[in-house]
Image (cartoon, grey):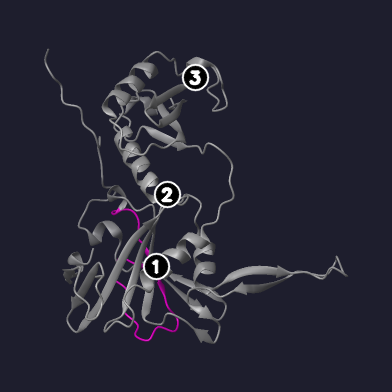
Amino acid sequence: MYRRDGWAIDIEPAVEGVATRPDFLVSKDSVCYYVEARCTFDGEDRGAAARLQTVYDSLNGTDSGAFHLAVTPIRVGTQAPPTANLRRALETWLSTLDPDAGDFSLSDERPERRFEWVWHDWHLLFRPMPRSANARMTPVRRALGAFIPDAASFVDDITPLRDALSEKGSKYGKLNHPLVIAINIGSGFHDEEDTEQALYGRVGWRINIDDPDAEATPVLTDPGYWGWPGRPAHDHVAGLLLAGSMHYSRVARYAPTFWLHPYAAQAIAPLPNWRVARAAPEGMEYSDPAVLPHEHFDLPVGWPVGDPFPRSSRSA
């Protein structure tokens, strides 16, 4: 992304007086700043989330024919599993199903409508999701169509983001250049309200217990990463570059959002392919990128196109 915009990138540059190194130092003309990057995932075990995502990436190459697959991770193992045999087993199982044979509810408990895979300490459950009749004429681009959690849980997408900001923003002390923290959010539930509360403070509601008809009023219950109103914090961070489930296949369709620190000690200009979020008197204001994502990377509209996992014909 930076190279496309003409920036020079120094990977893991040394910082005087600090043993650890930032991920990148980017420079263009007279502008220079650091970039720290990381991902956040649902739950606390980032290693397990990464292993599960690797399995998902592999399973998306399954030739699922007339179906998509819904997957439930019942247990994520401690080591990366082989998935080639699993893909073949899923293809064989799906080939025995008739996509027009009645209801394919995801709550169907009939054995033939479930495929359970156990390998060492891994346990995944798959269910079939028929594709529409018209869609079956084209190859499946991604076999996995739904990700269903094993159990209900309380979703908190504010704390992981704030923790990630605190971790990345405090590793190097006072830097000689501004810092941009780039985070890829892996949660499917994270939204802009979560980001606002992580940066500007959690919102609570004050009610009058003596007057149940009185209107509740919003109040800040704790400071955000940018600090309290009038009492800024972490002003060495110029902003947060945030993406949601960014993946190489989405770079031509999806623009990350740059959340400007309103009290940054030194502001930086966003790249042309960034969407920008800035605080305004009436709330947050968002501006679209000046250059569309596919134009920034010189890719065709809708890239990638075709079958992402082409199967070559092999003679016997």
- Please give the residue where the numbered disc 2 appears in the rendered image: 45
Task: Read off the magenta span.
Answer: 251-275
Q: Position of residue 170 (x, y in %)?
A: 38, 74
**Among numbered discs 3 and 2, the one appearing first in the sequence:** 2
Which kind of residue does numbered mark 1 sit on? Glu
Q: Main secondary structure of the magenta part?
A: loop
How far is the residue under mark 3 from the one under mark 2? Answer: 30 Å
Q: Is residue 239 left or right of residue 222?
A: left
Which mark's residue is nearer the viewer, 3 or 2?
2
For marks 1 and 3, the one nearer the N-term is: 3
Question: Which corner quadrant holds the N terminus?
Answer: bottom left
User: Does residue 251 lie above or below 33 as drawn?
Assistant: above
Label 2 crowd bin: few (<14), some (14–19), many (20+), radius 10 Å:
few
Residue shown at the point (66%, 68%) measured from the top left: 204
Instruction: Identify the residue position indicated by label 1 in the image.
Output: 167
Query: Mark 3–mark 2 contact, CB under 8 Å?
Result: no
Query: Residue farthest to the left?
Result: 315
Along the line of sight, which residue is nearer the eye, 190 or 175? 175
- Tell me the amino acid under the disc marked 3: Arg
Q: Is residue 252 magenta?
A: yes
